[in-house]
Amino acid sequence: MTVGGGTFPQPGEISLSHNGVLFLDELPEFKRTVLEVMRQPLEDRTITISRAKFTVEYPASTMLISSMNPCPCGYYNHPDKDCLCGPGMVQKYLSKISGPLLDRIDIHIEVVPVSFDKISDTRLSEKSEVIRQRVETAREAQIERFKEEEGMHCNAQMSSKLLRKHCQPDEAGNQLLKTAMEKVGLSARAYDRILKVSRTIADLAGSENIESDHLAEAIQYRSLDRDGWGG
């Protein structure tokens, strides 16, 4: 379904969303085997389907967005309501999302319930037009950065070589990354993704260099890199 297949292979959802967005709601409700085959396309941005007499390659450069509850009943870690799940059910539910798949998702954020005070707050927030202009400026900076790199248009596509060229934090930033990796046990792949996200945060801030606060924000966006998530 996601990567395609069959006797005469057709593109799956991950290829049909090439250069677009693939949204998977209630991620743990998908079969684990279905989710695991997405690891290679998310890494290589292509999907290869092999048959006895031929091999087909489809493009798969997609932005994966997904959502999930913290447990089957939805109240695990809720500040006001008790979780109704039995012993082991929460871990079994979370373990449907493997560590290697979680590694390949750049940003994962745990969303807490919104209080009445925030819902009823009448203060004006930042206008969409202002946010859009900031995003467009950041994208223009990335296009300029990769103008000599064929087929590369944004920070997420950077190779290890380009990471070393464009994502070098200062000494304080390196120490912050070291502490985070040792404390949380981040993988090398998570390290690369933190650098890519921090480079984008710096672009949005109009900063030529990656500062410590950009790295700190990128690290905070990996809230599921901890015990209990990713079986």
Image: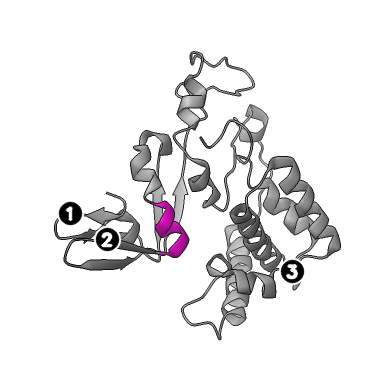
Type of the residue with mark 1: Gly
**Point 60% across, 39% down: residue:** 224
**Point 63% across, 67% down: residue:** 134
The circle drawn on residue 6 is 1
Type of the residue with mark 3: Gln
Residue 219: percent from left, percent from top:
69, 50
Residue segment shown in magenta: 38-45
Residue 56 visible in the displayed image = yes
* Label 3, label 1: how far apart the Cα atoms are: 44 Å
Residue wearing tag 3: 168
Counting other residues with Cα less than 10 Å from the Cα at mark 2, is it few (<14), some (14-19), or many (20 or more)? some
**Whether residue 135 is situated above or below residue 96 in the rendered picture:** below
Type of the residue with mark 2: Ile
Residue contact at pointers 1 and 2, CB within 8 angstroms: no
Instruction: State the SS at label 2.
Output: strand
Determine whether, in the image, residue 215 is placed left or right of residue 79: right
Give the number of the mark in front: 3 or 2.
2
Q: Nearer the viewer, residue 184 or 144?
A: 184
Determine whether, in the image, residue 173 is placed left or right of residue 73: right
Residue wearing tag 2: 49
Instruction: State the SS at label 3.
Output: loop
Residue 42: percent from left, percent from top:
44, 57
**Point 42% across, 57% down: residue:** 40
Residue 174: which quarter of the image?
A: bottom right
The circle drawn on residue 76 is none
Q: Is residue 111 magenta?
A: no
